[in-house]
Amino acid sequence: MYREGDQRMNQHRRAVASWCLYDWANSAFTTLVVTFVYATYFTQTFADNADLGTALWSRGIAISAVLIAISSPILGALADRGGSRRRMLVISTLLCVVATGALTFIVPGTSSAVWLALLCFIVANVAFEVGTVFYNSFLASLATPQTIGRISGYGWGLGYVGGLACLVVALLGFVGIGGDPWFALPQDSGFHIRATNLLVAGWLLLFSLPMLLWVREPTIERAADDLNAVGGRAQVAQAFSDLKRTLLRIRDFPEIVRFLIAHLIYNDGLVTVFAFGGIYAAGTFGLEYDEVILFGIALNVAAGLGAWLFGFVDDWIGGKATVMVSLVALAGAATLAVLAPNRTWFWVAGLLIGTFAGPNQAASRSLMARFVPERNQSEFFGFYAFAGKATSFLGPFLLGILSATWGQRAGVSVVLAFFVVGGIVLYSVDERRGCERARET
């Protein structure tokens, strides 16, 4: 009996470690492709000028955001009905791997290169985000109410470290920042830069294997119609029926509704910070490109440490309180960034934002996992993904308008408004009642 219990404990620990490692694996995509390396390469080489390249890239981001917002709840409902979260996670991960790797071989200046590159990026980005829906939905089944905060924090913190580790390998080994690159890759048409996409694809595939192989679908008691539905068409039809039913009865989950509205608002602030932090650093404080990269790395390190440390705080004071603390700190840091008189104070503000951005994201995920009924994990995390993307254009849009009218400092001040308003909405959420409602369903 002891050996069986000990074996189950070891299997559980392996599953938790594998789940956390998936964050390490997929963060390479957002760090290198979406943020630092390929996005910059595309905007500078695939169009006649950087402004046009930026406009084209922003369209790719916008199209993928719309597709993610539409597809996430539907695919989540389909995965819940068929008990296929793990299978759909495998499919979405492999699709992201293939599409990301394909970016390596699209040469700027060749026929249809712009549209092929954008198509591959959109496919990869949608697959990445949809995969996080299924990935996040495993959290509640791997954690207890006493450990859900720290496990979410472990994963998020490890993700920041993994993204940075892959970025370092790319910059030193492929691009050759600060000296000769480790690998003698051809530099014609920027192949050595495009090859970082192969690094990302391999990184994601390799480090996601433990999650894909060892973390099993949780056993959940399902309704008879779930079990009797056969055939792909029947499953899809039933999934749409489930989604419609959930939309009609979502008023029965008022804490989830309030939380999703709050998350939609304050997450726009985070999206804007990460999208324009480097631009603000260079435009207002005159940071050079290398300094911006260093600034971005420092923010990611701070966010990773913050997510890891505040995971324990989350389990101690609860997810809502942890998110509220992070929003107060983020609002203060945003105010400091707007008013900063010099680089030193800007760096202080940036490190504060990094320190509390990680806990905000990790605790938001754990709070959602506490609120979600067991048999609807993927479906509700699909709505969570929808809330993260539905208005993600709004922050950058308002920042652009204010910056063009009154300057970058005024533009960045919009971030403060998102954090404050999001916090006010979150204050109305009753975490205890939301957890009780999940257990009753």
Image (cartoon, helix red, strand yellow):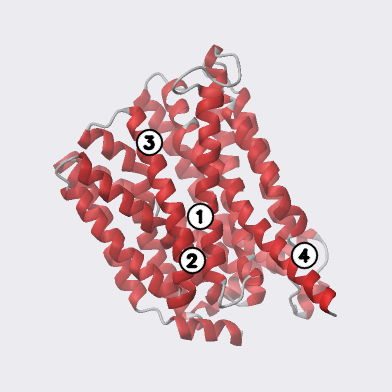
- Residue 325 placement, left or right of 128: left
**Furthest residue in direction top, as rendered:** 188
Across and down, in percent, residue 380 comes to: 57, 68
Front of the two marks 1 and 4: 1
Gap between marks 1 and 4 measured at Cα:
40 Å
Image quadrant where residue 6 sits: bottom right
Residue contact between numbered discs 2 and 4, judged by CB atoms under 8 Å: no
Identify the residue position indicated by label 4 in the image: 234
Residue at mark 3 to residue at mark 2: CA–CA distance: 26 Å
68 vs 147: above or below = above
Residue located beneath label 2 in the image: 311
Question: Looking at the image, is 255 positioned above or below residue 16?
Answer: below
What amino acid does circle 2 point to? Answer: Gly
Q: Residue furthest front?
A: 2
Q: Earlier in the sequence, mark 2 or mark 4?
A: 4
Element marked by disc 4: helix
For marks 4 and 3 on the same chain, the one whose residue lies earlier in the sequence: 4
Question: Under tag 2, what secondary structure?
Answer: helix
Left or right of residue 273, residue 83 in this image: right
First-in-chain label (3 vs 1): 1
Q: Amino acid at mark 1?
A: Gly
Tell me the residue that label 1 is attached to: 157
Q: Amino acid at mark 3?
A: Leu
Residue 313 % position (x, y): 44, 70
Crowd band around label 3 with a 10 angstrom C-alpha radius: few (<14), some (14–19), many (20+): few
Tell whether label 2 touches label 1 (CB within 8 Å). Answer: yes
The amino acid beneath tag 4 is: Ala
**Between 182 and 22, the one nearer to me in the picture:** 182
Q: Real-space Cα distance between discs 3 and 1?
A: 19 Å
On residue 170, which mark appears? none
